[in-house]
Image (cartoon, rainbow, N blue to C red):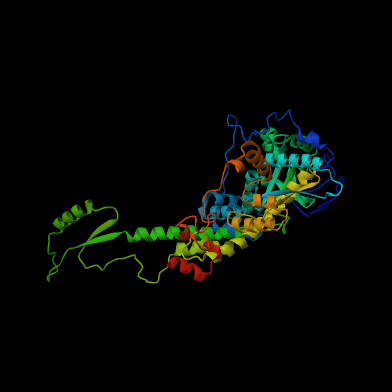
């Protein structure tokens, strides 16, 4: 294969690398990135033509037995498993909430730092100029918004296949149809996408909504449908992010094993509904007595008339019968005192099978410290995907002439540990370490915003000169206020810093 430096071939039956699949690798980056004839305004990307022949999405509902069958051979059933997971994500609030919980375990906070720079000879003005360009590029990528969607897809389906529309003002990430994508090559520790161009045989109307590269390679496929069916897309604008990096030949959704537990929950709900309906039924028995001679104590026709009158006014849940013999009480209600709520137990089993604490979603008797430790363990899974995103962004950044000496580093930060991470960075800053950018990023302030806000508050508004701190116990002396002793003393600890006995003491106070 030509021009395969720094590439590693990965065995994959779904894609067949060939010498023509990367024939555009030497294409100038400028010609790839500037496409005025296709996108005069890159802030707008057409996803579908509402006035044209738009197709509706197709959902696949499989039985629990089918899911079990698919999991016996996930390689050959990759598409079916993915379709099942997508459907469950749409239909099950438990599964969707679980995926959203894991995707929220990263703020996608990042820091841009110099990379491979000789500080003794580097020119500050040149570094600052390129640094500003890098910040503008990353800002145009809208990382926290676009890659949050990438994170969700990876946690749901295992792999996100994407390509970029790149312009001087914006970078838009377009998701590719997973059924027609696979991974065959690793380049610079980033997975490259191989695309099945037979997709456009039945979807030619969508060809214009893909970058120009697709039109060129589809034309090559039309000339040689055998050898050019699978072609590698140009990097660094196309990439794949995978959750399970230890299995590269096929996609394995990380939570696919939960599908059967989700079906169990629905089964238990249906059983409980049936049980509740049965418990709501009642029966009225009208007994027509018989004397010692074996004769009816009431005229049978008159008794039937009374029974019909009664039956006509009863609601649907109450039945009536006319009988000559006594009938015992009929009840569908369970009498077991220790009967547990099977639905609640099934939901608990679902989250246990996912490896997370069910108390995160239904907090009845949770220890704050135990929950904090559980979240930290869960965060490791999400951060692994974030590091793959980091590699893809850095590969794209290093392809720019001004970005070769910079790199992006994502922080292991989330809404659940923001204070803890921020405290660690602020202490490092107090010891003289150059981590102000890290602290700001952990608190949600990106570097380009930090620079602009500092300029706005200091040079434009003069906030620091015009504003004085609000008075509080920390800024007053002991004699400044009679009420200062009211709030004196050590600040309360956060709940995740308390021991179980400390939590109980606070609750009892």
**Figure quadrant of residue 372:** bottom right
Compared to residue 395, the image places residue 509 above or below, namely: below
Q: Nearer the viewer, residue 479 or 24?
A: 479
Q: Nearer the viewer, residue 193 or 437?
A: 437
Answer left or right for 51 relative to 171: left
Compared to residue 168, the image places residue 245 above or below, namely: below
Whole-percent x, y for residue 412 in the image: 66, 56
Q: Nearer the viewer, residue 460 or 15?
A: 460
Residue 49 visible to an observer of this rendering: yes
Whole-percent x, y for residue 462 in the image: 62, 39
Whole-percent x, y for residue 501 in the image: 50, 71
Compared to residue 387, the image places residue 52 above or below, namely: above
Residue 61 visible to an observer of this rendering: no
Whole-percent x, y for residue 321 in the image: 24, 59
Compared to residue 194, the image places residue 344 above or below, namely: below
Residue positioned 71% across, 46% down in the render? 181
Answer left or right for 424 relative to 184: left
Q: Quadrant of the C terminus?
A: bottom left
Looking at this view, name the residue that lies furthest to the front: 479
Residue positioned 22% across, 54% down in the render? 311
Residue positioned 71% across, 39% down in the render? 136
Circle count: 0
Q: Nearer the viewer, residue 343 or 438?
A: 438
């Amino acid at each position: 294969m030509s021009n395969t430096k720094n590439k590693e071939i990965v065995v994959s039956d779904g894609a067949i690398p060939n010498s023509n699949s990367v024939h555009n690798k030497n294409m100038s980056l400028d010609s790839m990135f500037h496409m005025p004839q296709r996108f005069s305004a890159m802030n707008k990307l057409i996803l579908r033509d509402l006035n044209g022949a738009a197709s509706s999405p197709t959902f696949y509902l499989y039985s629990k037995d089918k899911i079990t069958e698919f999991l016996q051979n996930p390689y050959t059933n990759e598409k079916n498993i993915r379709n099942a997971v997508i459907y469950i994500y749409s239909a099950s609030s438990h599964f969707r909430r679980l995926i959203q919980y894991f995707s929220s375990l990263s703020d996608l906070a990042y820091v841009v730092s110099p990379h491979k720079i000789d500080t003794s000879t580097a020119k500050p003005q040149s570094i600052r100029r390129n640094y500003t360009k890098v910040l503008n590029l990353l800002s145009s990528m809208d990382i926290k918004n676009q890659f949050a969607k990438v994170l969700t897809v990876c946690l749901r389906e295992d792999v996100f296949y994407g390509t970029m529309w790149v312009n001087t003002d914006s970078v838009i990430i377009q998701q590719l149809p997973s059924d027609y994508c696979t991974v065959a090559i690793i380049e610079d520790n980033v997975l490259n996408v191989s695309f099945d161009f037979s997709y456009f045989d039945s979807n030619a109307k969508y060809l214009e909504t893909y970058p120009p590269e697709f039109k060129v390679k589809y034309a090559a496929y039309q000339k040689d449908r055998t050898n050019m069916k699978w072609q590698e897309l140009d990097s660094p604008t196309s990439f794949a992010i995978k959750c399970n990096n230890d299995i590269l030949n096929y996609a394995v959704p990380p939570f696919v094993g939960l599908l059967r537990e989700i079906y169990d929950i629905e089964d238990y709900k249906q059983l409980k509904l049936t049980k509740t309906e049965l418990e709501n039924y009642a029966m009225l028995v009208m007994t027509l007595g018989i004397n010692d001679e074996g004769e009816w104590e009431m005229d049978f026709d008159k008794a039937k008339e009374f029974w019909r009158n009664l039956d006509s006014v009863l609601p649907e849940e109450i039945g009536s019968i006319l009988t000559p013999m006594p009938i015992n009480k009929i009840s569908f209600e369970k009498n077991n005192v220790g009967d547990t709520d099977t639905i609640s137990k099934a939901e608990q089993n679902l989250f246990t099978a996912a490896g997370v604490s069910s108390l995160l979603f239904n907090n009845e008797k949770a220890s704050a410290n135990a929950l904090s430790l559980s979240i930290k363990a869960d965060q490791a899974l999400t951060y692994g995907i974030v590091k793959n995103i980091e590699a893809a962004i850095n590969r794209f950044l290093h392809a720019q002439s001004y970005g070769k000496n910079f790199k992006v580093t994502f922080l292991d930060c989330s809404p659940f540990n923001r204070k803890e991470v921020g405290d660690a960075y602020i202490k490092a800053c107090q010891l003289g370490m150059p981590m102000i950018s890290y602290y700001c990023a952990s608190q949600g302030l990106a570097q380009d915003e930090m620079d602009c806000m500092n300029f706005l508050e200091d040079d434009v508004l003069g906030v620091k000169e015009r504003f004085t701190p609000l008075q509080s116990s920390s800024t007053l002396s002991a004699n400044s206020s009679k009420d200062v002793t009211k709030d004196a003393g050590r600040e309360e600890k956060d709940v995740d810093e308390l021991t179980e006995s400390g939590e109980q003491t606070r609750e009892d106070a």
